[in-house]
Amino acid sequence: MKRTTAVPSPYNGMHVGIIMDGNGRWANARAMPRTAGHRAGVRTVRKIIEAATRAGVGTMTLYAFSSDNWSRPTPEVSALMRLLRRSLQVESKRCLENGVRLTVVGRRDRLPSPLLRVIQEAEAVTAHGRNLHLRVAIDYSARESIMRAASLAGADATNRERFAALLAQANHDPFPIRDVDLLIRTGGEQRLSDFLLWECAYAEFYFTRRMWPEFTEEEFLKALVDFEARERRFGGVPAAAAS
């Protein structure tokens, strides 16, 4: 992976969230175990991180393991935990080389201790990355996060900014993040699945039928171009109507 530096871009500073759906179905369609689909998905993650960094995206949040995923068969969950640990070990080195800050959001009290140690090490070693803030959501539930933030707030949630700071604290985030600008979901489904509900209040959505292992840099860039062509009004009126 070549060293990548931030460049002027129309996407500088934007926040892209991705629901990486379809690993298991991709594998089943090829008569392969579901774990093979998850391994293929990791290779796609690497390509999309590189593409996002080159494009100048400021923040990217990847939905790696939801709190509801604990209900999957135990062998699959165990394999996913091992894969996440190995992937974070490898990718943290790549992130360091390319100025990418890596953080993990979500609960930590239910994660295996070897994975938790790797998370802490990856966050520490990449803490000074400035080209991209890569957030990986593990054991994450947006509704649970909002509830935890509300319990921290008491009577202190006097405005959105304060609550956003409490939400960051609840998610082990180093600081409040920008709202999601673009939400991409692969795999053909068209729902949020308890992902970044607060942050996606005015997000633009991009859905594709491609399974996550099939998602390419070209499709990612297509999603960015599609986003750029949209008019975001945030509750206002179109510019032409206002004039």
Image (spheres, grey):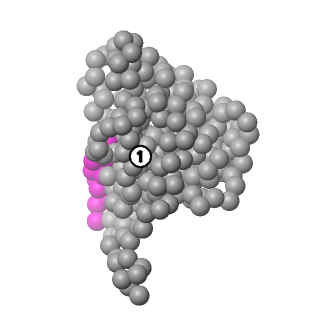
Q: 144 and 25: which one is in front?
A: 25
Q: Which residue is mark 1?
A: 184
41 relative to 223, above or below: above
161 relative to 33, above or below: below
Residue 97, x across and y down, in percent: 71, 37
Q: 193 and 219: which one is in front?
A: 219
Determine the residue positioned at 37% across, 70% down: 234
Judge from the rendering whether residue 39 lies leftward or rightward of residue 128; answer left or right: left
Neighbours of disc 1 within 10 Å: few (<14), some (14-19), many (20+): many
Judge from the rendering whether residue 6 lies leftward or rightward of residue 231; answer left or right: right
Using the rendered view, name the quadrant where residue 43 is placed.
top right
Residue 150, x across and y down, in percent: 29, 56
Determine the residue positioned at 60% across, 31% down: 91
95 relative to 201, above or below: above
Residue type at the position of mark 1:
Ile
Which image quarter holds the C terminus? bottom left
Which secondary structure dominates the residues rendered in magenta? helix
> Which portion, as a residue range, is magenta?
141-156
Residue 157, x across and y down, in percent: 33, 65
Judge from the rendering whether residue 95 lies leftward or rightward of residue 72; answer left or right: right
Q: Is residue 105 visible?
A: no
SS class, disc 1? strand
In the rendered image, residue 243 lying in the magenta stretch gets the answer no
Q: 7 and 28: which one is in front?
A: 28
Which image quarter holds the N terminus? top right
Q: 37 and 242: which one is in front?
A: 242
Determine the residue positioned at 52% across, 36% down: 216
In the rendered image, residue 149 lying in the magenta stretch gets the answer yes
Determine the residue positioned at 59% across, 26% down: 89
Residue 233, x across and y down, in percent: 38, 71
